[in-house]
Amino acid sequence: MSRLEAKKPSVCESKPLTRERLRTTLSVLKGIVASCYGPSGRLKQLHNGAGGHVCTTSQSSALLRGLSVTHPVLKILTTSMQNHVSCFSDCGLFMAILCCNLIEYVEGIDLAPTTVIELNKQLLSLCTSYLKSEACACRIPVDFSSTQILLCLVRSILTSKPACMLTGKEVDHISALVLRAFLLTIPEKAEDHIILGKSIIVPLKGQRVIDSTVLPGMLIETSEVQLMRTLPIKKSSALKVALFCVSLSGDFSDTGEGTLAVSYGVSLESAVLDQLLNLGRQLVWDHIDLVICQKVIHPSLKQFLSTHHVIAIDRVGVALMEPLSKMTVAVSSLLLCNRNDTAWDELKLTCQTALHVLQLTIKEPFVFLGGGCTETHLAAYVRHKTLNEPGSILKDVGYTQTELHLIAEAFCSALESLAGSLEHDGGEILTDMKYGHFWSVQSHSPPVANWPDLLSRCGCGLHSNQEELSWSFLRSTHHPFVPQNSLPHEAASSANNLTLDCFTAKLSGLQVAVETANLILDLAYVIEDKN
Amino acid sequence: MVMACRVINNRRHVGLQQLLSFAETGRTFLGPVKSSKFIIDEESHESVLISSPVRLLESLDLTSAVGQLLNEAVQAHNDTYGTGTNTLLFFVGAWSSAVEECLHLGVPIPVIVSVMSEGLNSCSEEVVSLQVPIHNLFDHVDNTNTFSGFETPSVNLCPFLQIPSDTGLIQKDHELKDVSQSMTIYSLSGRPVKSCKLFRLQAKVEANKDASQTLQTLINSRLADTSCRKSILTHSRHFNSTDNNHWVSKPDGLEQPSAATSKTYSCNDLVELAVGLSHGDHSSMKLVEAAVRLQYQNACMQQGSCSLPFMFDVSRIFTCCLPGLPETSTCVCPGYITLASISSTALIKELKDQPVRVVLVQGDLTENYRHLGFNKSTNIKTVLESMKVNQDSTEELWAHHVLQILTQFNVHLVLARGNVSDHLNEKCVYSKRLVIGSVNGSVMQAFAEATGAVQVAYITQVNEDCVGNGVYVTFWRSVSVDVVDKKNRMAILLKTEGINLVTAVFTGPVTAQMQTKEDRFWTCASRLYYALKEQKVFIGGGAVEFLCLSHLQIIEEQSLKKGNQAYSGWLHNSSSWLASSLALYRPTVLKCLANGWHKYLSTLMYNTASYSSEFEASTFIQHHLRNAIDSGSPSSYILSEYSELNSGVFNSGISNKLEQIPRVYDIVTPKIEAWRRALDLVLLVLQTDSEIVTGHGHMQINSKESEGFLFL
């Protein structure tokens, strides 16, 4: 007899955003992501507290794997972050911090959520259309005839993850390797539409970073015993390959439910082996030189193949199957070394991000200025536009200029605070009144400082203290100004050591952050099923 | 699931303190005089005797995140290099406290990270000048059994540097073996030197077979390649190289020896090298040296004329522990020594003195064994259709079948990597066949190479091509009762002509010491392996650390004078304010980094009992440090004062006569990598500000600990 239990009533919480519990957890989450941000970000040790693997990281994708949040509102945030990272790999922290900031900065504003949401949308479209326009002063077109910009882009990604534990020389080495690995995935014969190949990262743990290398083609691990048997390969022409994704180990296919009765004296195992050997004969007959199997090949079949001078490699794993089937396209192997496991894991993830970012950059050949400059510049642009041309923003919606100014201020502060999250050591952030770029200075600098003496370069590295600029603290009130276009593009693309960000990933991060913040701000009730 | 998060760097960095306390436990392992430790389990009252960081960490509770990272770093280093974990553990501690000191002085974390990291880089480049090339070690391996290498001045055979005009060169000439493509190489002084064998062994550019490349460009490229040519060495009794004329000052103030005036010291004697790398553990190193000689002789016999450069192969050394036997039985033998049940005594007597045929089985030798990746179906049932079927069990049938195959191919020896069915074993003994299970993979490989056998997964795969020939089975010692252990097993020896396998047998009355003996043997083997592989060693006995110490002090003084110009590339993020504040903090951070080496040296000297206190040792170091820096070139100071410094650090029990003190050597890459790993770990922990406990682990955070945890 089954027992029925009365269902627990669902719990309904109104105006979740005003609750203390959410505010606290949201600020803890923001604390975690913001403290990870940028090249001097702090690392997190993720572990299960019971002797499991320890992951030391400051990357959103690794953090997400370990983060398990209970509050439904936080879940919305982490899910958005997860989706963004799985599509673009980069700018996950950017998106999460901005989203938290947007929610935080509208908190004290006494406006209906719909107003806030609608105005946020207007500001977002103002931003995206500017960032996508020719007039945008914080992006640089990528010149594919030189490696300069692409190397800077990869470098910026590598240096923004301190848990990789790379020295300056090692950063240069790995950046060059990542770029080479990527270039090797571009097919030589370009037709109407290019299908990019794959780059496989092969672990070589425990070795020096500087021993890492890139090989065209695929590297397959095989046992020494097997290798001795197959080498030397005498054939000079290309090998004929048979690729199996099914197991050739000789076990039976699933017999389903119930029991299978077999007469005494009948050996299913040898029957299957006979079939495998038939297959082997066919392979020999078809002049196959190399048999590769994702799973296991039966030792007897292997022995048969090897006596017929067919090379058999098994257990290559599912990860290699797709690139193996694409061997006719372009494939490269990046042999990655690092001294310890935790740093290797971080380096691998970072290189994957960099490879993905390079792919995205081929599709949309632009890069954003990094180091906080895009954020501060964009904030300056939004301030200027909302003050001087409010009509163009408000033309389709019926809100007042005051409402717009309030929300625009919150929006810009969220962007500027995001840029400020790059600073973790008590420095202060300045912005110049010409380009609106990001500058950092040691705290407690003299109040009437001679700024050029204290500042060297802006965050992205494009401007130096040599130019006659005027500066102001980022958080202080200052008159909005028209942020000007930077150097001509030719000069920018030839500049060395720029800090750059992925165009596609950052643009999407901005959109996802605003949309997620809007979604959360729109929540009137949280209804939880407690059963 | 709930997640907990704790900030760990509030006032004092918890992680760094944990590292420090773990590292402190390994302090007494440093140096040639090691104090062992007993680790006692309070619950089971079991205890182990340990004297290495690897074994120490194996026995400690390392469930904390930092403890695990430390263990991971030590294990990874040990797996890669097999030596250097003492150095690693010590520097983890020394640099943890150095970093804490920096934090205390208010240095921003990114500045500590970049200055320490680049400071270590700079040291690693600097110590290249203390490298000693290893030359033609095996030219006279058969006739050198004494320390003769110490009495005669070393002969310079390096063609790229000036050749001292002594008769040694002529003597050496006839020793150069006939090499297929003989060629003449001009040394920088213009004197033709016939030494292409040496060139071949040494040249890094040998892979470049470009015919158009002239020898001169090869030579030039070698010189441009700064490493290992930079210096030199050493015997202060024979010449004094403090003379500053030999050094040209580069604009940045770092000295560089001028190539034309450099003299080369090289190590070309296996005994000298082995003694130098033994670090006080002569008994283990003697075994290793014997193993190398056996491998070398075997290689010569196999190849006829030793035309290929000989490689010491650690994977072809096997160890066998026989506790209970007297210490004197410890030895190294060619072939494979293993334990077999005493019940097969008669069988072995029978097999003795005749070559037997062998089969090598990769897996278990049991009826129900299936190869990896084969999934057995559970729902298949065999149905008996009539009662007249043979009543034998399937195992019986299988064993019978196996025996049939062995008989068919006349096989009397089976080596299996996995377990062996007892039933089969009995049957085999009965039919005069020996089956040995749990055989190591590289032993199998050695037998496969020497006998022509092909490893199989199943006995049913065996055909004539898989069977190997010519294995001899005997008792290890002529009197078999000598070597019976507590489990009624005796040591037997399997040998075949030309097998590239050496077994080191460890014996001794104290069972607790067995593990330590084996560990020490492997440490020595790894050291010699890396020395031979890299063809270079460091001048040891603290010389390298001393050079780092003085180098850091020099760049510290320079950066005080010069300010920000130099080393501006030391921070990744050069646009941050941190880059401009580097100059302010650099001297402080470099000093703290240098303190690590100072601590290492003083602990080393104190541990070797040459000094009654670490303070006294520290004073000694300080004195020489000042002299070294004042001399203008610390590396030449070290080279000239080496004997004295050496006797100060490493004089324990080797020899009291200064002239007879053999040189101490260190291996190159494992040492530098140990520093790097130690610093990486410390800096990784330093940059960590919180730990996030995921999954159900937080349940174990009890109420007392949970203070400071935030739950999400």
Image (cartoon, grey):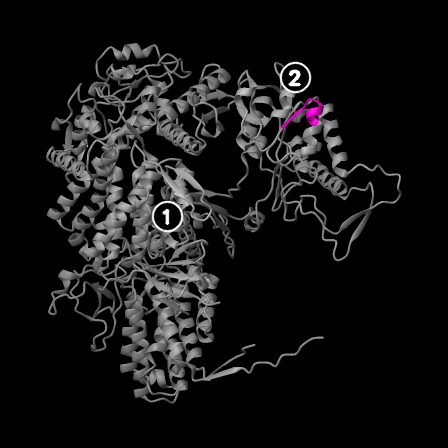
Give percent across and percent down for residue A206.
41, 42
Query: Which mark's residue is nearer the viewer, 1 or 2?
Result: 2
Is residue A129 visible in the rendered image? The answer is no
Amino acid under label 1? Leu
* In magenta segment, residue B139: no
Which residue bears the numbered disc 2? B350
Count of marks overlaid on the render = 2
**Residue designated by label 1:** B70
Q: Are marks 1 and 2 on the same chain?
A: yes
Residue B667: x, y in percent?
Answer: 32, 31
Q: Is residue B18 visible?
A: yes
Chain ID of residue with mark 1: B
Image position of B703 with respect to B551: above or below = below
Q: 10 Å neighbourhood of mark 2: few (<14), some, or many (≥20)?
A: some
Structural crowding at the residue carrying mark 1, measured as other residues with C-alpha within 10 Å and reported as few (<14), some (14–19) or many (≥20): many
User: Which residue range is magenta in the image?
Assistant: B428-435
The amino acid at mark 2 is Glu
Q: Are marks 1 and 2 in contact (CB under 8 Å)?
A: no
SS label for mark 2: helix
Estimate the spatial distance between the alpha carbons at disc 1 and disc 2, rounded to whole Å: 53 Å
Quadrant where the C terminus of chain B is found in the figure: bottom left
Q: Is residue B430 magenta?
A: yes
Residue at position x 89%, y 39% from top?
A: B388
Q: Secondary structure at mark 1?
A: helix
Front-most of A380 and B83? B83
